[in-house]
Image (cartoon, rainbow, N blue to C red):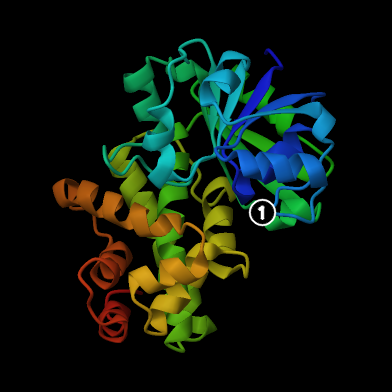
């Protein structure tokens, strides 16, 4: 596998992944949209907006505000742009990605198209599925910044490609495993953010740990039912790439989706919560995507339905969650 690597995105997850990759390669390209961010990054050695306790050797980074420069000079692209902004970023692209190996670190779907990121990249840019990978697992960017032990699952239909990328991301504080269940990992990564919102809402409504454990166990069952309906591949839903990711996203103080849910449970409107957070809660967009897909499929997803009712139908969180309690076991 070639080792010319480009990072697309400048948020906390992109920054954490850049830190990991730079443990195993001498130089990276990095697409950051705003020049003033790059200028401050070059001066301080830190991303001014995210994980600014993490220092980088900027002599080993070639920054660019032009996505085409980074794509042209990279063999491997790490896509870490929040899902609501992927289309606007890729519309600027004039370079072919057909021969690139792309690792999607996106925890959402292409909402305008209502498709998984890998599926969109395949049909829009003709990138073979064997060159499309996903990253999943319990791995908050803030803990990567502190070198705390984390676990990643790398998914690809070509297990050899997954193994090679897993080696690139393996560090003393990051353990990696591989999987061929790309669809399952992607859908689980989208849905776990929905359940984190639900967990946050329930926390603000003063539902205790007992109920939270029931909520999460039912969430895992929903993921299992939905992924089975969408993709019949083999998967162990109890593995860290699925269950582990759900648990950390629902319980961690670093979880922005849980934080978003807490604010909704406290009475914030969706818009006011988004403004105050100043960060993207992917679960808000993922809720609409999964709900729309499930209108055709009719899989039993009571927690997803409840979060959709709260966020998009503006129903009372207290009333919706009370009704939800009677549907869980």
Q: How many labels does the image show?
A: 1
Q: Residue at x 35, y 54 (%)?
A: 285
Quadrant (top left, top right, bottom left, bottom right) of the C terminus:
bottom left
Circle 1 crowding by C-alpha within 10 Å: few under 14, some 14–19, many from 20: some
Q: Residue at x 39, y 77 (%)?
A: 264
Examine the image and state in which quarter residue 128 appears.
top left
Can residue 328 be seen from the camera position used here?
A: yes
Examine the image and state in which quarter residue 7 appears.
top right
Above or below residue 61? Residue 248 is below
Residue 74, image x, y percentages: 62, 17
Q: Determine whether the residue tagged by mark 1 lies in a helix, strand or loop.
A: loop
Above or below residue 281? Residue 176 is above
Q: Residue at x 39, y 73 (%)?
A: 272
Question: In this orientation, which residue lies closer to the viewer: 64 or 311?
Answer: 64
Residue sitting farthest toward the top = 99
Q: Residue at x 46, y 33 (%)?
A: 182
Q: In this view, does 236 lie to the left or right of 316?
A: right
Residue 26, image x, y percentages: 82, 24
Question: In this orientation, which residue lies closer to the viewer: 92 or 83?
Answer: 92
Residue 88, image x, y percentages: 38, 36
Quadrant (top left, top right, bottom left, bottom right) of the N terminus:
top right
Question: In this orientation, which residue lies closer to the viewer: 2 or 225?
Answer: 2
Can residue 211 be seen from the camera position used here?
A: no
Q: In this view, does 257 lie to the left or right of 19?
A: left
- Report which residue position mark 1 lands on: 50
Q: Is residue 21 left or right of residue 278?
A: right
Residue 120, image x, y percentages: 35, 28
Q: Is residue 210 left or right of residue 264?
A: right
């Amino acid at each position: 596998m070639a080792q010319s690597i480009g990072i697309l995105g400048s948020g906390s997850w992109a920054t954490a992944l850049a830190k990991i990759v730079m443990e195993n390669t001498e130089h990276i390209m990095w697409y950051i949209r705003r020049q003033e961010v790059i200028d401050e990054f070059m001066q301080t050695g830190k991303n001014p907006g995210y994980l600014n306790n993490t220092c980088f050797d900027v002599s080993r980074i070639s920054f660019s505000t032009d996505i085409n420069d980074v794509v042209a000079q990279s063999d491997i692209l790490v896509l870490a742009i929040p899902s609501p902004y992927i289309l606007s970023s890729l519309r600027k692209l004039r370079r072919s990605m057909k021969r690139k190996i792309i690792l999607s670190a996106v925890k959402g779907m292409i909402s305008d198209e209502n498709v998984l990121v890998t599926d969109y990249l395949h049909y829009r840019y003709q990138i073979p599925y064997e060159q499309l990978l996903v990253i999943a697992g319990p791995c908050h960017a803030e803990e990567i910044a502190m070198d705390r032990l984390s676990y990643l699952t790398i998914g690809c239909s070509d297990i050899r490609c997954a193994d090679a990328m897993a080696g690139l991301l393996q560090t003393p504080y990051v353990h990696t495993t591989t999987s061929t269940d790309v669809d399952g990992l992607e859908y689980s990564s989208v849905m776990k953010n929905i359940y984190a919102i639900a967990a946050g809402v329930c926390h603000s409504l003063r539902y205790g740990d007992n109920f939270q454990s029931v909520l999460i166990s039912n969430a895992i069952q929903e993921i299992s039912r939905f992924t089975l309906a969408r993709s019949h591949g083999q998967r162990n839903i109890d593995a860290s790439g699925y269950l582990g990711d759900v648990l950390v996203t629902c319980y961690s103080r670093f979880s922005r989706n849980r934080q978003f849910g807490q604010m909704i449970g406290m009475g914030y409107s969706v818009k006011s919560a988004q403004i105050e957070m100043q960060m993207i809660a992917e679960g808000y967009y993922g809720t609409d995507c999964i709900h729309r897909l499930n209108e055709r499929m009719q899989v039993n997803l009571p927690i997803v339905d409840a979060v959709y009712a709260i966020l998009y139908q503006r129903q009372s969180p207290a009333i919706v969650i009370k009704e939800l309690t009677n549907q869980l076991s």
